[in-house]
Amino acid sequence: MVMGSDNVIKATAVGDERSRPSTAIIVLAAGASTRMGRPKQLLTYGGRTLLRNAAEMAAASVCRPIIIVLGGYADQLQSEIDGLPVQQVVNERWIEGMGSSISAGLEGLKHCDREGAAKAVVLMLCDQPFVTASVINNLVTVYRSNGTGIVASEYGGTVGVPALFGHEYFADLAALSGAAGAKQILTAHTSDVVRVPFPQGATDVDTAEDYRQLLRDTCPHDRGGRRSWTL
């Protein structure tokens, strides 16, 4: 099922969700950036690091609680989330891959949400710079207006994160390990997935060339001045 761009979250829905939050969010930022050769979480775009931007977008959304999963470079990254209403989780097994970070995030959510108020969780990465609070909120709105268990972003001919998973998928997410990410759950339950078009979701930053291309496309006059690294 595909939802169009007319599913814009209404102000009343934002207020309702914030007054009694039922959707958590996990920001995955534990990777070692091996393809980049240095922590991509600290690359600057639009005046903020990718990690800070992702954390601020999560904080501006209706989702609570907010779990930030760190791993590789955790000591260098912690200051980037200072002052934000987030809970930090350090995945000690980050080297095993994305699945272990998702599992760590779900474990962190369990500790933050002892009353079980969270009926859904959004997974997002820190290296998709065009994810905004509106994008996140739209996933929540679509979920609340449909009976399906998963709402995923659609881009580049596929579905992926950011994606929202209902409570019935928490155990599956927690059981992920190694390099396996949420994509395998999306693939295994296609009939339960509502797809929300988000073309800009195809932009992520994995390599130095990805970063240079991002700056060329969006900051043509920047000349790299806002970069954290010389690439």
Image: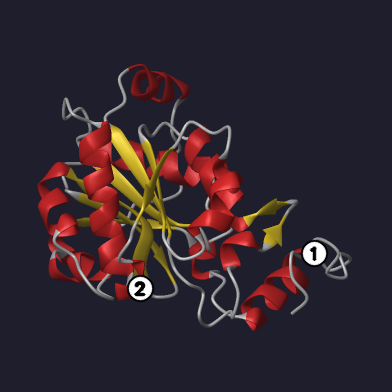
Tag 1: residue type? Cys
Crowd around label 2: few <14 · some 14–19 · many ≥20 (10 Å): some
Judge from the rendering whether residue 91 lies leftward or rightward of residue 27; answer left or right. left
Residue at the disc numbered 1: 219
Expressed as whole percent of the image width and height from the top left, the position of residue 37 reads 59, 80
Residue 142 sits in quarter: top left
Expressed as whole percent of the image width and height from the top left, the position of residue 186 reads 22, 65
- Name the secondary structure under disc 2: helix
Tag 2: residue type? Ile
136 vs 52, nearest the viewer: 52
Q: Is residue 112 above or below residue 77?
A: above
139 vs 181, nearest the viewer: 181
177 vs 216, nearest the viewer: 177
Color encoding of the figure: secondary structure
Residue 189 sits in quarter: bottom left
Mark 1 or mark 2: name the one nearer the start of the chain: 2
Name the front one of labels 1 and 2. Answer: 2
Q: Is residue 23 above or below residue 31?
A: above
Q: How many marks?
A: 2
Residue 226 sits in quarter: bottom right
- Name the secondary structure under disc 1: loop
Expressed as whole percent of the image width and height from the top left, the position of residue 114 reads 18, 29
The residue shown at (50%, 35%) is 59
118 vs 80, nearest the viewer: 80
Q: Tell me, yes or no, if residue 221 can be seen here.
A: yes
